[in-house]
Amino acid sequence: MTNRKNRQFLLTSRPVGMPADENFELREVTLPDLEDGQVLVRTLYLSVDPYMRGRMSDAKSYVEPYPLGEVLQGGVVGEIVESKNERWQPGDVVVGLLGWQDFSVSNGRGLLKIDPSVAPISTALGVVGMPGLTAYFGLLEIGQPQEGETVVVSGAAGAVGTIVGQIAKIKGCRVVGIAGDDEKCAYLTHELGFDVAINYKTTADMRAALKEACPNGVDVYFDNVGGEITDAVMSRINFQARIAICGQISQYNLEKPDLGPRVFTQLLKSSALAKGFIVNDYAKQHKEGMQQLGQWVMEGKIKYRENIVDGLENVVEAFLGLFRGDNIGKQLVKVADL
Amino acid sequence: MTNRKNRQFLLTSRPVGMPADENFELREVTLPDLEDGQVLVRTLYLSVDPYMRGRMSDAKSYVEPYPLGEVLQGGVVGEIVESKNERWQPGDVVVGLLGWQDFSVSNGRGLLKIDPSVAPISTALGVVGMPGLTAYFGLLEIGQPQEGETVVVSGAAGAVGTIVGQIAKIKGCRVVGIAGDDEKCAYLTHELGFDVAINYKTTADMRAALKEACPNGVDVYFDNVGGEITDAVMSRINFQARIAICGQISQYNLEKPDLGPRVFTQLLKSSALAKGFIVNDYAKQHKEGMQQLGQWVMEGKIKYRENIVDGLENVVEAFLGLFRGDNIGKQLVKVADL
């Protein structure tokens, strides 16, 4: 490895409100030589995910804050291009938590080998990766959807929401998705089989729209967004309903916590259960989840879409697009060809 | 039965905000003759409970609204004084959902016979009755307290809260109670064995007080009150904490829903579980719960206190006292001697 260049994105200041370019720095460094036990991974795809916003702040959360002045971290599909670790060979394609950079040096821990002949390698960051598992365990373990019940999912056109709705259909539920534009809504109902999709940006009275979409009330709510949308769904929640709290993207960029009707009163009136979760709460069952998701994809029961931006230099822009709702399905950044 | 008089309280209008005398009417009627299958129950003790506020409104909830112009209903311990039903004999002491009146006519359904030689008959409305079972199932089934964990209970000096804290101590937990005056707090720590009691009315910074009282955070929160107290507790909630939502008494008399930080964000950050519940969710286990509670009372592991107001004519006043926090332990109205 002689003087190979590496571009990398650092977090240089903590965003207040919506993150902006000034919070990040793109710099170019020379790659160090590998030490024994290390591998060099060439980045092929980077994942950008809403939860990363939380890591950019230093508030207490379920993941550690990103340290300032260091390379940002996220899900990466890459190729091993050099190895001083006998477990890994050049040419291996892997997925793991690595840097927002062209090349990452790793000791190999936490890397998972993927087989490019089974499915497109990018799906390891999407439908059969973390977002797919998040949908799988959040819906099935917390939501416990029963045949004939009504499942509502917010952020329905995103990487997680698209999978939640399709699994709920597999389980025989009525599925109502909430999304932010008509193209997304059409995708949900025409391509993914959702029963109803509601465009919250053009719907004046969400409570009335939900009442019409859910004549028997809401048995399971899979929440990716929080805020006013969640208030509206909670007003239709059924006795002993289950609410899987996966994300609260409407809140992540607020400087002060948003205010709204107290949700505990609604949980109380309905004997309903609400549970926050992260995919790692179900780490012991991840293998089972990946197998089931892979099988459903092969059988055509789960479709997926990826929104791919080209070039490492566009990763911040791709990340910010998550909060504008630019993407349908999983947002990825393609950094290099295999 | 010749012309026996019966005083009864009716709901005559739906309260807006805090109920007042004008919402109720005390009238005197003549008792009808019993029909076949009916029994006449002489009221000995009446229970007043915060959930009754919800039934005075006509909003959708887990129980039907009280009809206007009819006798109010609640838990009653009474004596059978006349019977045209072979299952019941004059002299039987029973507990059941009957009227706010001197005498109730019943077909016997839903009445439970109690044995005055085992425990004071009033406890059938308290520690071994609905409030005790509410504490038992809410804490053990939803809270799942583990030895060494920290349990916080709001409304700690009430009929349910006093039992919750004592069961949590039996389970080996650190127990922190929140109540509204120093006498209540002293009772909790000196007589019931709570580790800490916080008087929220004299504590300027509840978050700081909770941080000091719960150095290892909050693993289980048993919520009777909601509102700002709950916001403060939620700020200390631990990863995978459990929140049993039993009551929201701070909210019941508000004309508009109170506002506050969105609790879903805190549930999400903590992978915490929140579940609303009513005691009937665990109807199949009520017998088991009553036996265990009775055993703990006999062993001196659970103490209880009753706040008894004399005279049917004072039932509205006793009910309103619940919202002022007049009572320590179970609030009862004594209507007649056995």
Image: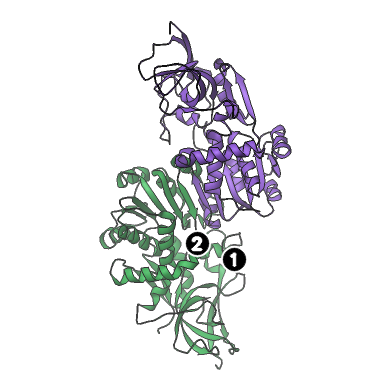
Chain colours: A green, B purple
Total count of labels:
2
Query: A297 or B134: which is nearer to us?
Result: B134
Label 1: chain letter: A
Quadrant into which the C terminus of chain B falls: top right
| Nearer to us in this view, A130 or A309 | A130
Where residue B269 appears, as percent x and y from the top left, is: 55, 57
Where is residue A262 drawn, in percent x and y? 50, 43
Q: Name the residue furthest top.
A: B2
Residue type, numbered disc 2: Ile
Image x and y of residue A251, in percent:
50, 54
Q: Residue at x 67, y 47 (%)?
A: B210
Quadrant in which the N terminus of chain B is drawn: top left
Residue B178's disc number? none
* Rendered position, A197 above or below A282: above
Q: Quadrant of residue B161?
A: top right
Secondary structure under the numbered disc 1 in the rendered image: loop
**Image point 34% across, 46% down: which residue?**
A210
Q: Is residue B66 left or right of residue B320?
A: left
Q: How far across and down, in percent of the image, does residue B113 sit?
A: 49, 27
